[in-house]
Amino acid sequence: MGKRFFIKTFGCQMNVNDSEKIAGILASAGYEKTESLEDADVVVVNTCSVRAKPDNKAYSFIGELKRLKKQRPDVTVVVTGCVPQKDWKFITERYSHVDIVLGTFNFYKVLDFIRSGKRPVVEVLETYSEKEMDVLPLIEPVLTNPHVASVTVQRGCNRFCTYCIVPFVRGRERSVPPDRVVDEVKRLAERGVKEIHLLGQNVDFYRYGNVRLPDLLYMVSQVEGIERVRFMTSHPAGFDLSIIKAIAGIPEVCEYVHLPPQSGSNRILKKMNRGYTREEYIEKVLMLKEEVPDVALSGDFIVGFPGETVDDFEQTLSLVEECVFDQAFVFEYSPRPMTEAFLLEDNVPAEEKNRRLTELNNLLKKQAKERNALLVGSMQEILIEGLSPSNDKKMIGRTRNNKIVLIDRDDSLEGKLVNVEITEASSFFMKGRVIKQMAGVEKW
Ligand code: SF4
């Protein structure tokens, strides 16, 4: 039997994409993917340190691997991602069962290190240049979803929001050359992928020579076989009319924008060093909704930032009332080492953070339900991604504006774009009925 690998991924879509690449590297060398830790010869932990919670979860998972390593000393344990980027020394000192520690800049060397047989190995680079990015190997990822794939087009960040560890663990902003992006998308399209997500920490700031994000969206949309294109994460300081026009004007670009406001209080936005005001945020959202009426707006919020008063929090609630979100993620502030805010007193009590989180979540949930309810009775184009993970009599798909729709199981529809009449809606998903014939759409 060939060797097997198991990957545990924490964190964002970029980490998922990196894990797909790590899986691709190992698969190209004959390793087989397994979902069972006990069967694995190589265990890769791809970590996240953006908040305290995933950071702690990664450590607890790494700790649990000690037992596995004791039972089977031949298992190779690899830790990569954002946590080693800040804590590689601590990991090597504290967790002697970890064989290979790799940072965010060199995870793609994983196979070389496994094969070298040298243990322990630590390679955590502080950065790499844009030029080096040109020569990184093109990797065929093992896709989590064969119909929808992500392509990382930009890594790192120059903005230094005072609460965020990303610039320290992912380095400065670097954009991937557009011909490389297009090449990667073509290869994915040849494998049957229909929907592409262009990923960047601040994707609106994508820039390579004269090529900006709207140009890149156009180039990727032209690839044969690609029916849908999304991009994330947007930054309110970089999101502008040229991007809005690209969403409105390029048919393949979906009507969905993830534009995190983080707070609705100008005082807190300034303390966070976000680089925009609530008025500027609201103005951009109104402009977006005017140009792209079907757009779904998504966002992230932090509650309980140091010094956030009840009045500041109420301004966040009022921003939400003004903008109306289809989807959002709310996090309680947690101090991250290396950041500027780490030096501030974390002075909003835990119960108050939790109260604000619940209140904001309730408002966002209500908005999501109302927005979804507006679609009941309408016809929506859905890309069927596969079986519902929680009900094998249902299939799951997404609308162009990224809303989840469940339909009755019909395996012949997997990977197809179908037209669905929305019959029911809740805050998190909708139900629908497939309509086989619909004027103007002949996707299947
Ligand atoms: S823009 Fe701010 S929140 Fe986003 S990755 Fe950069 S520093 Fe972090």
Image (cartoon, rainbow, N blue to C red):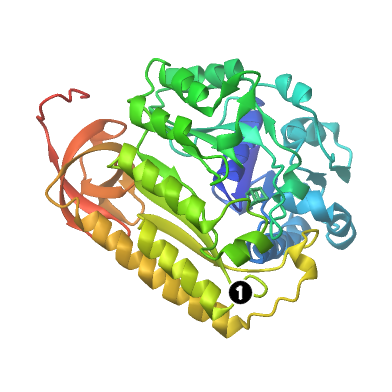
In the structure shown, which secondary structural element does the residue marked by tag 1 occupy?
loop
Residue 75 visible to an observer of this rendering: no
Q: Is residue 339 left or right of residue 292?
A: right
Nearer to us in this view, 269 or 182: 269
Query: Height in image: 193 above or below 343?
Result: above
Nearer to us in this view, 63 or 434: 434
Measured as percent of width and height from the top left, residue 337 is found at 78, 62
Q: Residue at x 57, y 37 (%)?
A: 203
Q: Residues within 10 Å of mark 1 (few under 14, many from 20)?
A: some
Identify the amino acid type marked 1.
Glu
Measured as percent of width and height from the top left, residue 188 is found at 48, 23
Nearer to us in this view, 347 or 84: 347
Measured as percent of width and height from the top left, residue 243 is found at 46, 32
* Corner quadrant of residue 374: bottom left
Measured as percent of width and height from the top left, residue 106 is found at 77, 35
Q: Is residue 66 left or right of residue 282?
A: right
Quadrant including the C terminus: top left
The residue pinned by badge 1 equals 308
Q: Residue at x 88, y 46 (%)?
A: 120
Quadrant including the N terminus: top right
Q: Residue at x 43, y 76 (%)?
A: 359
* Corner quadrant of residue 153: top right
Q: Residue at x 70, y 36 (%)?
A: 173
Query: Height in image: 269 above or below 259?
Result: below
